[in-house]
Amino acid sequence: MNTKFFRSFMLAMAVTSASMLSAQVQTIVPPVVAGAKPVAVEHIKIHGAALEGNLEGDAVDRDAIVFLPPSYSTDQSRHYPVVYALHGFFIGAAQWTGEIHVPQTIEGAFAQGYGASRIGMKHADVFGALYIMSPCCMSPMTGGGPGPADKMKEMAIENEKKIAALKSPADAAAALPGFGIAQLATAAAWAPDPKNPPLYLDLPTKDGVPVPEIQAKFAANSPLAFVDQYIGNLKRYRAISMDVGDQDGLRFDAAKLHAIFDSYGIANGFEIYSGTHTSAVADRFQNHVLPFFSKNLCFTTGCK
């Protein structure tokens, strides 16, 4: 990539290994802003060095969609900050752009002047501001859940049987729809096992019983567990903000993260809006997320 590309104001949606939801979710669509100028759209490939040689054989080169502001082609001397948007696990870049209704929402935001919590905590040296939308997976994912212990053990055993029957990673999506595949992806990232084919991972339970050393690996990668280690990083940001719907089950953990930020004196915005996990995502993106970055990112050379 050239220097100009890095300096551009862009939206990069890296594609996850599984695009499982084919139907677009219903969201509130902001009205079209009169006089909004069109943005340029580019489809590129990003080489993921960290994925090289991965045990599951996931693609190393990933698709990304880049949106460039109307002035990008004509004002080549201008400094443009970069916005990276990371979508959720179950969808790909193309579907998520539809769900947040870009480029319409980006064009609307420009016309009015305007992956994440984990990456943001660990890489404050790379990014200047952090906006976390409906954050997932704050607490450890251990394969358990609410309900009677006997029922949870029965479900864990059933899940283990399904996984044991898999012949290859490619079979997983069909055999384990929904959050079953998410658990496998989590295990592949946090508890890889080169000696355990064909999936090369360890589960947090065995015969329905928790495996402490594997569950510890899951917990160690959960933001609510490791956030205290990155307080210094978080204080380096120009601004941090977070939102979540009042009908979203993720709101409880999001509130915990906000409380931790407050307890350490980390300035952060936090809003619980009226809606579900997806119902207001397009409106939030146009009228809250992009204005937040417009206010808090660096637009001049030499600024910090």
Image: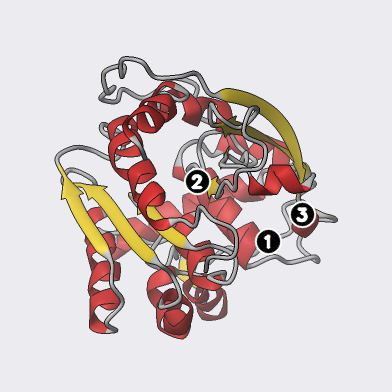
Nearest to N terminus: mark 2 or mark 3:
3
Residue marked by disc 1: 201
Gap in angstroms between the C-alphas marked 2 and 1: 14 Å
Which of marks 1 and 2 precedes in the sequence? 2
Q: Amino acid at mark 2?
A: Gly
* Amino acid beneath label 1: Leu
Task: Name the front one of labels 3 and 1.
Answer: 3
The disc label shown at residue 180, or none: 2
Colour treatment of the image: secondary structure
For the residues bearing labels 2 and 1, Cβ distance under 8 angstroms:
no
Instruction: For mark 2, give the secondary structure.
Output: helix
What amino acid type should be assigned to the residue bearing mark 3?
Answer: Leu
Q: Disc 3 designates what residue?
A: 51
Q: CA distance from mark 3 to mark 1?
A: 15 Å
Foreground tag (2 vs 3) = 3
Seen from the viewer's position, the closer of residues 127 and 277 is 127
Image coordinates of residue 219 in percent, x first then y, are: 47, 74
- Residue 160 visible to the viewer: no
Report crowding for label 2: few under 14, some 14 to 19, many 20 or more residues within 10 A (C-alpha): some
Q: Secondary structure at mark 3?
A: helix
